[in-house]
């Protein structure tokens, strides 16, 4: 396992799937990064050695929604001498689509949310096919809800993170199913 100081993670998933939650889990586990929409590493990737970092993306991403290039981000981290890894989160499609309808201003109706979800999953699968499978980890939102402490600890261990204080996870699916 590489030195934790050189680890870089890209957290990604379809919109409203839990990428902010997942990013918070990695930050609690020892990474530097931002769980919100603004991402410091969009502007400058630091040199390795300062500790593990996490860079968040949702599919689509941005005020004007577009599909980000996870493969480009992965390559940029490699070129900057980081040891990159992609951590993907998926969530029940019905909850994801209903959450997107509530939270994403560009989603017009449930049919539009379903279309965006399908396009997001397709784009994500296509890009993940270009990244070595040993550089990918998949987490489900539901596993984080059902077993938050155990899943957080297992994820930190799997990714080589020192770990930390477990974050509180609440079931946001209940109000959407």
Image (cartoon, grey):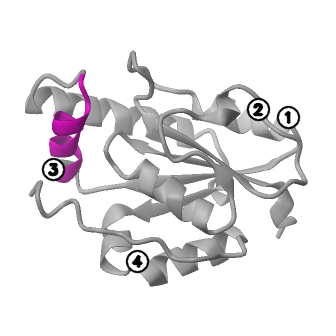
Q: Nearer the viewer, mark 4 or mark 2?
A: 4
Q: Quick check: marks 1 and 4 in contact, CB under 8 Å?
A: no
Residue 10 location in percent, x, y? 61, 46
Are the two marked residues, 1 and 2, in contact with CB atoms closer than 8 angstroms?
Answer: yes
- Secondary structure, mark 3, is helix
Name which of mark 1 and mark 4 comes first in the sequence. 1
According to the picture, the residue beneath numbered tag 4 turns out to be 148
Tag 4's secondary structure? Answer: helix
Majority secondary structure of the magenta segment? helix
The secondary structure type at the circle numbered 2 is helix
**Label 4, label 2: how many angstroms apart (C-alpha)?**
32 Å
Q: Is residue 170 magenta?
A: no
The structure residue drawn at horizontal position 16% and vertical position 38%, both measured from the top left corner, is 102
Q: Quadrant of the N terminus?
A: bottom right
Range of residues picked out in magenta: 95-105
- Residue at the far bottom in the pictured view: 150
Disc 1 marks which residue? 79
């Amino acid at each position: 396992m590489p030195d934790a100081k050189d680890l870089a993670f890209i957290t990604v998933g379809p919109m409203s799937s839990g990428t902010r939650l997942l990013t918070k889990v990695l930050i609690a586990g020892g990474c530097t990064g931002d769980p919100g929409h603004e991402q410091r590493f969009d502007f400058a990737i630091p040199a390795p050695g300062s500790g593990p970092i996490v860079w968040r993306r949702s599919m689509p991403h941005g005020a004007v929604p577009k599909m980000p290039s996870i493969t480009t981000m992965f390559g940029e981290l490699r070129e900057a001498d980081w040891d990159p890894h992609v951590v993907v989160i998926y969530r029940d499609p019905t909850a994801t689509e209903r959450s997107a309808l509530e939270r994403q201003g560009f989603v017009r109706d449930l049919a539009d949310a379903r279309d965006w979800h399908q396009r997001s999953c397709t784009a994500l699968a296509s890009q993940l096919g270009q990244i070595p499978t040993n550089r990918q980890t998949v987490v489900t939102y539901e596993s984080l809800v059902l077993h938050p402490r155990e899943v957080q600890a297992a994820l930190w261990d799997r990714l080589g993170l020192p770990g930390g204080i477990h974050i509180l996870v609440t079931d946001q699916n209940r109000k959407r199913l």
